[in-house]
Image (spheres, rainbow, N blue to C red):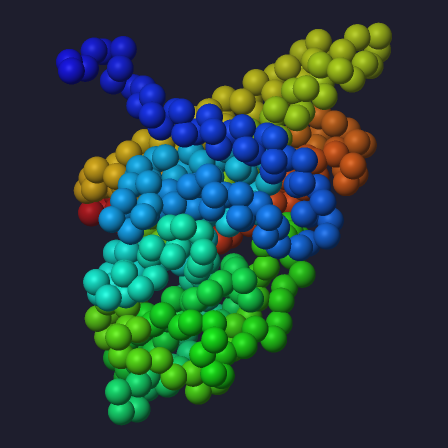
Amino acid sequence: MTTTLTDVYEIPQELRDFRDLVRQIAEEQVAPRAAEIDIKDEYPWDLRRLLAEQDILGLPFAEEFGGTGTGTLMLQMAVEELAKASAAVALILMVQELGSLPIQLFGSDELKQRFLPRCATGEWSPAFALSEPDAGSDPAAMRTTARLDGDEWVINGTKNWITNAGVADFYVVFAVTDRESKRITAFVVEKEREGFSVPKYEHKLGIHGSPTGQPVFDDVRVPQENVVGEVGRGLSVALGTLERTRLGAAAQAVGIAQGAIDYALAYAKERIAFGKPIIELPTLQNKLADMQTKTAAARELLYKACAKMDRGDADKAMYSSMAKLFASDTAMEVTVEAVQVLGGYGYVGEYPVERMMRDAKITQIYEGTNEIQRLVIARQMKG
């Protein structure tokens, strides 16, 4: 088929159809539960099952492992649609990629066959355990260690701020295996391994309903076949993973921003002040116009970065960082403005924009802080 100029900048119809399905699920099934999930701070197992049944949890995976094989752009469009309704539910899909991607990109065929099909069906859920109490943006400060004892690795240490802690069936864990040369290695640790526990969970500003905890490894033994990639090359595994998965944070940010705009706009059409709907006030129109423009720009940058990642373009890492940086800053700005549009109502829990504002903040922090993203972008520019 000959591509016409009108098709050049369009998302393929099959992806738009799947996006519309996710949007319908988000509007009909997720949105009505969003406030309750936030208030109770309980993991929504029923919605996770729904995402699995609808093949949405199969989006991060290739067809050979039972996934949809539809690529990064489709995955992040789905994250965006879910995040419009609930950032916590969107994170279920985001971590489905984050915790399994090290195995997809760097794992042995045996590891892939053992873990990926059961993730693609949604039966298993993964987690990504890189950060530590004293090693967030600086993996070189990592204290968790792994030493070889016979044909097994023995892992000791504590991780921090780990999404899906206590929910995940397995964890991709990064540990120092050569202290002198500061070499780290990635391992798969199943939840039932002796010596593994999650004794502490965080009480967070936002993203309630998605557990964030502190996994502890006390002489946890794993076989050598659980090594992801090469021994001593764990940093490459982490960076190669985050290069792609930070697009999930960007998509989540775009979804939160759009969700806040949609609610603020509907409110502005209904709310009467000075005898007419407040949408008629020029100052409010200006505010909403800026919110919509910045969110649209963030979405375009996100989709461009996703396309580059799917194609394997040379500048994919820079675009990935730019999308995450711009989208998350936009989400924070837009949600603050949405609260302002609602006035006093925006500040109370009865209305969703205060939750969206709290949820937006984390997008500037996780998957690499925005300060780190700026370093990555500048480094890429220098060449």
Picture coordinates of residue 296, whole percent (x, y): 46, 24
Farthest residue toward the front?
A: 53
**Above/below status of 26 relative to 208:** above
Q: Is residue 300 above or below residue 213?
A: above
Residue at position x 34%, y 72% from top? Answer: 187
Q: Is residue 175 above or below residue 309?
A: below
Instruction: Tell me the quarter of the picture where residue 29 sits.
Output: top right
Locate residue 34, reporting x and y percent: 66, 41
Q: Residue 211 or 55: which is nearer the viewer?
A: 55
Q: What residue sits 67% from the left and 47% below the top?
A: 37
x%, y% of residue 295? 50, 28
Left or right of 9, for residue 209: right
Asked whether residue 353 is in view, the answer is yes
Identify the residue at horizontal 35%, vertical 28% (top origin). 15
340 on left or right of 253: right
The quadrant holding residue 144 is bottom left
Question: Quick check: 108 above or below 270?
Answer: below
Quadrant location, the N terminus: top left
- Residue nearest the observer in this picture, 87 or 28: 28
Q: In the current view of this chain or complex, which residue is farthest to the left?
A: 2
For image coordinates 62% across by 72% down, the residue present is 200
Residue 327 visible, this angle: no
